[in-house]
Amino acid sequence: MKKLKVVLSLTTRDNDYQIEQAAAAQEMADRLNLDLELLYAENDAILQSQQLLNIIQSNSVPHPDGMIFEPVGGTAMPQVARACAAAGIAWVVLNREVDYISDLRRNYKVPIFSISSDHEEIGRIQGRQIAALLPNGGSVLLIQGPAENLAAKQRTTGMYETKPVEVHVKVMKGNWTAANACKIVNSWLKLSTSQQAGIDIIAAQNDAMAMGARKAFQEIADAGQRERWLAIPHLGIDGATKTGQAWVQRGLINATIVVPTNAGKAIDMLAHALHTGNIPPEKTLTKPKSFPAIEDLAKKSERRSGAAGGSGF
């Protein structure tokens, strides 16, 4: 049986979820005895496009059997996808629902499909976490992913569906990294309006940004202000075992949402398709879950509120 070669393009190497994606992919590649080439786009959609096109258009090295990528930008590179399929290379999209896949599957015989987290459901879970912590309303600082990123938009949409009407949301844009979140929160803290905002929860759209916000609060010179901000519940998303879940257990953030990595699953599905000729479904969705469970988060909130004499957070 031919040894397969697969290229995996991830958004950045500075994000715990992407690191876990890479680890899961390499583990699956080792298990299946296939060659895996990892690329990192450094949060640059143009760079990602160039990296993939360079491989597709290369005449100096054999083409890979398949490309798997998680898009950085607002589109999932339909032109690159078409060039890839036309070159006889399988194409798999991670964490993005794309509308061009149906057309490509009709016109090309190579495996073409997507595997995504259910981002609207992720947002709904975060909205339920907010409801558990603020049953009587309040204010949330939402640190969102990039404005053009569909996953960030879908997570926001889902959150608005389930958060209490009485909860008001202030949004700031991040880029999925802790360093960027720390920078934008630091800048916001310098504004007089930040002191009047009455924020009750920091809700970040990934765990790295939640920790970046926490780092910004740790850098506040005034001890009273620093402790007040650090006492506010922090919520994240991704729930990697060694980071998000560990941070919850250590009390650094209050809750996360476990988003199953799908790069390893994508490699497994792609290898099976290439060996058997059985094309996977056009779209596969993985299921997220709250960590801790919403019920447990609500109980902790009740205990904390009671200990504070009913004054909330």
Image: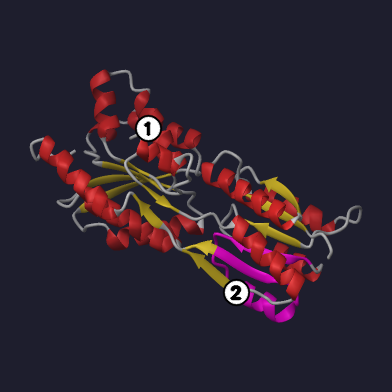
Residue 234 placement: quadrant: top left
Looking at the image, tell me whether mark 1 or mark 2 is earlier in sequence order: 1
In the displayed structure image, the side of residue 86 where residue 121 appears, left or right: left
Q: Amino acid type of disc 2?
A: Glu
Where 128 sits versus 283, above or below? above
In the displayed structure image, the side of residue 254 where residue 35 appears, left or right: right
Is disc 2 placed on a helix, strand or loop? loop
Mark 2 = which residue?
282
Nearest the eye: 212 or 282 = 282
Q: Amino acid type of disc 1?
A: Arg
Nearest the eye: 297 or 232 = 297
Is residue 187 highlighted in magenta? no
Residue 245: tell me if it is visible: yes
Is residue 97 highlighted in magenta? yes
- Check whether the beta carbons of the residues at disc 1 and disc 2 lie within 8 A of each other: no
For residue 247, the mark is none
Nearest the eye: 212 or 25 = 25
Q: Residue at x 84, y 63 (%)?
A: 2
Nearest the eye: 166 or 312 = 312
Q: Label 2: few (<14), some or many (≥20) within 10 Å? A: some
The x, y position of residue 301, in whole percent, is 20, 44
Mark 1 = which residue?
214
- The span picked out in magenta is 89-115
Q: Residue at x 78, y 63 (%)?
A: 65
Quarter of the rendering occupied by the C terminus: top left
Residue 1 placement: quadrant: bottom right
The extreme right residue here reads 60
In the displayed structure image, the side of residue 145 where residue 53 appears, left or right: right
Q: Residue at x 60, y 67 (%)?
A: 114
